[in-house]
């Protein structure tokens, strides 16, 4: 079976939706390149910046959709549908197309922080963003 979506997928405190799933790399796989990925809910859809690339032996591919959560975005907590496609690069240099559907549930990943320590949401958001700034 090819790559698929993790479920649930979580919204961060700033409304970013983390999208991810297992790479399911086999012994001859070198890289997974996701060229199309859409999360759809109630007729609205959003996508991360593409392509998403995972290199073997990474167990997971991942990306993010900034400002995905309503009211800025189009998605909210609840059931969603996803679809992705791309290819696996094999050691031989051959590219094998992969595609998969999914039915991830979208959850508020910030809820526990908001409930337990609401005064730390801003600090956590800044910390979480700092890793992205350094990776750029």
Image (tube, helix red, strand yellow):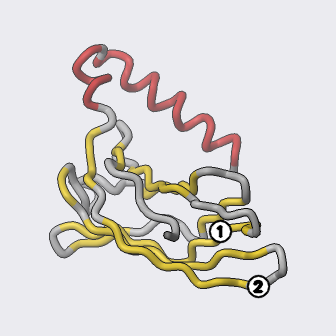
| Image-based side of 42 in relation to 2, left or right | left
| Image-based side of 108 in relation to 1, left or right | left
**Which residue is tagged 1?**
32
Distance in Å between CA atoms under marks 2 and 1:
12 Å
Q: Residue at x 36, y 24 (%)?
A: 121
Q: Earlier in the sequence, mark 2 or mark 1?
A: 1
99, above or below 110, in the image:
below
Could you say where residue 131 lies in the image, as x and y percent from the top left? 62, 37
9, above or below 92, in the image:
above
**Which residue is tagged 2?**
94
Q: Residue at x 61, y 43 (%)?
A: 132
Judge the density around disc 2: few (<14), some (14-19), many (≥20) Cα neighbours within 10 Å. few
Q: Quadrant of residue 130?
A: top right
Front residue of 38/101: it is 101
Q: Which mark is residue 127?
A: none
Spot the residue most to the right. 92
Could you say where residue 96 lies in the image, as x and y percent from the top left? 65, 83
95, above or below 110, in the image:
below
SS for dot 1: strand
Front residue of 61/4: it is 4
Front residue of 121/25: it is 25
Q: Residue at x 43, y 58 (%)?
A: 65
Q: Residue at x 23, y 72 (%)?
A: 44
Q: Quadrant of residue 42?
A: bottom left
Judge the density around disc 1: few (<14), some (14-19), many (≥20) Cα neighbours within 10 Å. many
């Amino acid at each position: 079976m090819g790559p698929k979506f993790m479920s649930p997928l979580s919204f961060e405190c700033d409304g970013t939706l983390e999208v991810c799933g297992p790479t399911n790399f086999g012994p001859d796989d070198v890289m997974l390149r996701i060229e199309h990925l859409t999360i759809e809910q109630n007729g609205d859809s959003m996508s991360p910046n593409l392509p998403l690339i995972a290199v073997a032996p990474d167990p997971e591919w991942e990306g993010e959709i900034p400002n995905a959560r309503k009211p800025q975005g189009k998605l909210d907590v609840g059931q969603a549908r996803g679809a992705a496609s791309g290819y696996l690069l094999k050691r031989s240099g051959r590219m094998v197309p992969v595609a998969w559907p999914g039915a991830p549930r979208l959850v508020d990943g910030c809820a526990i922080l908001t409930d337990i320590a609401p005064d730390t949401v801003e600090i956590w958001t800044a910390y979480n963003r700092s890793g992205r700034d350094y990776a750029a």
